Image (spheres, grey):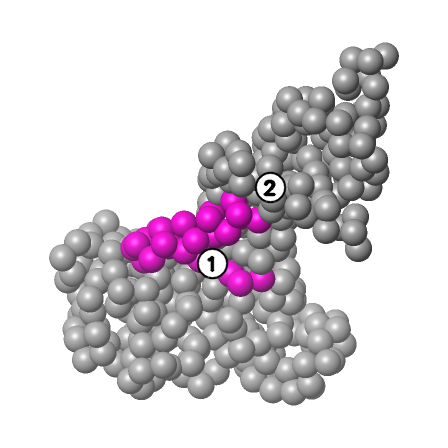
Amino acid sequence: MRTIQLAFYLSFKEIWRNRGRFFLVSLVIALITLLVLFIAALGEGLANGNRQYISNLDAQLIVFLDKSDYIISASRLEPVTVRAIRRVDGVDAAGPIYTSTTEIVSTASPLKVSLLAADANQPGMPAITSGRAFRGGDSRETVIDRNVALRSGVRVGDEIRIRSVQGTEDHFFNLRVVGLTDGQSYLFQPTIFVAPSTWEHIRPQSAAELNDDTPLVNIVAVRLSDPGAIDSVRALLPARVANIEVADVTTTINNIPGYSAQQVTVQTQAFFTLLIGILVIGGFFQIQVLQKVPQIGVLKAIGSSNGVVGAASVLQIVTVTAIGVGIGGGLTYLFSLGFPPTIPIVFNGTRSMLAVLALLLIGPLGGLVSVIYAVRIEPLKALRLQ
């Protein structure tokens, strides 16, 4: 106990006497913390922008056209396939999902959005947080994601005007906003939902598609009667329904073009930022130990043990690192309050906590060399008596 008390006294006494120097190091650690937390939030934001709609589906399995490599845009299924899927044992519900893009032109500045179609009350149609679901048929009604409302100021009851290129000409369509949903970004764009019949009339189409009145489904979201039977139903579906391949939600997300490469890039940036933090902290405390070799020699000469010297060094490193991480965390929170919704920054509690824990660990890890050096100092050599 006395060893710990003495170590506390020595470490905090030195920090207080040299508070300017240690505060500057804490600020450097704070900047590293700020960078690491924003990289983590950027990675989460980019991932959400890409996967959010798919990850929030009320479904356990996704059905694609065979040999489409689980890529949504490459999959085209006949409407009869949806009916066949619904008849397979273990399937509780199957909802067709149609994907496209369009542009809202009735706002102050044009806003590009993902245009998705799904059947109301089926997997693929998200929960309504405000208003109501659209009616079926060519109702020209839409449910919009909250991000659309934040970026455009559109509210439930308003009418929006969208532009679609059909053939070689621009066509404009009016849609009445009847509902609001949340957390449904798809391919980095906010999303609007319409009924399948409406989607077929207003979506961008090539000249060849204009002559085809049969809307082709991109994917089918399948909700199971027993979620625990996912493996058996996944094997049963291709056996009962021709020309399809089946994936779970995780596989579907990982096959979104660019998703995996994007996450690897962000994680690599975070790793090298932490590595830089280790080198910075290690370099500073190594210099600190070299500057106070005579003082450490005196402590050992008057009877202080290696345990006291080592514990004092570790406590000093942990304290300075914790102060820096605390300042950096506070700055991150303040900066996050001013970011507009167009910037894909999302602070995930779990991911941010892991980043903070990693930052707290890099202090002792970076200062490990200096602690070992301090413990190995010989009193007589330090005082130049030998």
Question: Looking at the picture, how far across and down is residue 101, in whole percent?
Answer: 34, 58
- Residue type at mark 1 is Phe
Q: Is residue 190 above or below residue 145?
A: above
Quick check: 212 left or right of 47? left
Dot 2 falls on a residue whose secondary structure is helix
Q: Quadrant of the N terminus?
A: bottom right
- Disc marking residue 347: 1
What x and y, as percent, mark residue 307? 82, 41
Q: Nearer the viewer, residue 39 or 167?
A: 39
Residue at (29, 84) in percent of width and height: 131
The image position of residue 41, as x and y in percent, is: 48, 52
Ranked by sequence position, the earlier of labels 1 and 2 is 2
Q: Please give the residue where the numbered disc 2 appears in the rendered image.
A: 13
Tell me the magenta residue range.
322-350
- Give the CA separation, mark 1 to mark 2: 37 Å
Q: On screen, 47 above or below 9?
A: below
In-image side of 383 versus 346 (left or right): right
> Which one is nearer the viewer's eye here, 33 or 347?
33
Other-residue count near label 1 (Cα within 10 Å), few / some / many at <14 / 14–19 / ≥20:
many
For this view, does 289 lie left or right of residue 171?
Answer: right
Q: Quadrant of residue 232?
A: bottom right
In the image shown, does 173 or 229 lie closer to the viewer? 229
